[in-house]
Amino acid sequence: MSDTKANNDAHLNLYEMATAQFERAADAIKLDPAIRAILTEPKSEISFNFPVRMDDGRIRMFKGYRIQHNNILGPYKGGIRYHHDVDIHEVKALAAWMTWKTSLAGLPFGGAKGGVTCRPGELSRTEMERLTRRFTHALGNNIGTEYDIPAPDVGTNSQIMDWMMDTHVNTVSILDRTRGKGVVTGKSLACGGSKGREKATGQGVCHIIEAWAKESGRSVKGLKIAVQGFGNVGYWTCKIIAEMGATVVAVMDHTGAVANPAGIDVAGLKAWMDANKKLPGFAGAPEVSADAFWSADCDVMVPAAIENQITGRTAPMIKAKVVVEGANGPTTTAGDANLASRGIPVVPDILANSGGVIVSFFEWLQNRASEYWELDEVDARLKRQILEAWSNVSRTAKERNIDLRTAAYAVALLRIAEAYRARGVFP
Ligand code: GLU
């Protein structure tokens, strides 16, 4: 089987996995069949092939997507991924997860996701800029401050968002330019971004770890944490959880894994990573195998990289007392089943990593009101909002005797179902 074919199959399964998660919860809450049918497929699936001039003068074609899953609760919302594995099935799954995530977090947003199939590490800064601007231009009226609002995801950051915003405002009427700044969130502070947005997803993961610890009679101090991924979510999770008194014992990304049972110096690892672009070799933590990472002696396992990581093969190795999903879709159906059979709860992605989109909402509000909130205000509001989602999920899981993932979907679906019930279906 070719790599592309294998990847395509894995992503087809990813969408099936997302659908299966949805259906389990829809059964649990006896969701109205009409609403169920509406939510099974995205409202629109947009794909583009667009040319980009490379630095050597040649033109290369790229493929980009924007999947708008649902907007009953408000404008479509969700990140843009730059990764070589991006395809339609993956973006469809990610878009559906955004619908559940924004609903669960109580935000006035729907769900969407976009992406460009590319290798960001192999593109120069100027190529990235041209690719981003051309993609944004191709998106045209399919995005907008009150219609569909992209944000960073794997492979994108505030610089990409700044270019997207700048391209968008340069293509709308001059009267819409100020409002047009809110077309994307996750911008840099200089371009109207929010304080606290960059760390927000990791910060939210840490609030969830603390809430789980409290509920299970533990303290964050001294908890041993293993984190897969050392990008935005993984790094901030490591940094913040260590500041809260936990010990980061193992970190793994696509370059390799490192571990130190006595604790990894997170700032040191970040400095090493920035200089060397890989984890192995860091003096403060010896390199270990991927299997050694999965079987690390820890209390909390945080997959914060990409999907399909905790599988029928890797799940049985996990010794943690809880899995907290910083990534989207990191646990497969077989992985979930194994963890459940061993009594290891999984705090699902749509709850655990919702800190990012929650602060995206704050950025959008600040842009609309031309306001700048202080960091302590952003932090306090994030904490309140994500902990409320946590208690809704935790309570629902107990009341209905279902796992946390199904409970999270149930809370999200009930809010969406209520909006459909009240509004009806047009005409
Ligand atoms: N890409 C992030 C996610 O998966 C953030 C989305 C957003 O802020 O709109 O939740």
Image (cartoon, rainbow, N blue to C red):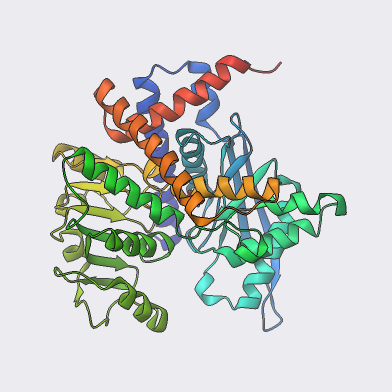
Residue 420 quadrant: top right
Picture quarter containing residue 352?
A: top left
Please indicate, yes or no, whether residue 420 appears anywhere in the rendered image: yes
Residue lying at 14% horizontally and 68% vertically, measured from the top left: 261
Q: Nearer the viewer, residue 294 or 350?
A: 350
In the image, residue 345 sits, relative to residue 139, either above or below, namely: above
Left or right? Give the position of 296 relative to 334: left
For image coordinates 25% across by 42% down, the residue present is: 212
State which quadrant residue 130 falls in: bottom right
Across and down, in percent, residue 218 comes to 16, 46
- Give above or below for 92 relative to 159: above
Numbered label tally? 0
Compared with 255, 358 (above or below) is: above
Of residue 190 and residue 16, the one placed in the foreground of this image is: 190
Q: Residue at x 24, y 23 (%)?
A: 401
From where the camera sits, is residue 354 visible?
no
Residue 53 lies left or right of residue 92; in this view the side is: right
Residue at the image point whose x is 24% and y is 54% from the top: 301
In what quadrant of the picture does the N terminus appear? bottom left
Q: Position of residue 207 (x, y in %)?
A: 34, 48
Looking at the rendering, in which quadrant would you find the C terminus?
Answer: top right
As drawn, the residue found furthest toward the right would be 174
- The x, y position of residue 357, in whole percent, is 51, 47
Does residue 261 appear left or right of residue 301 in this picture? left
Residue 36 position, x and y percent, is 49, 23
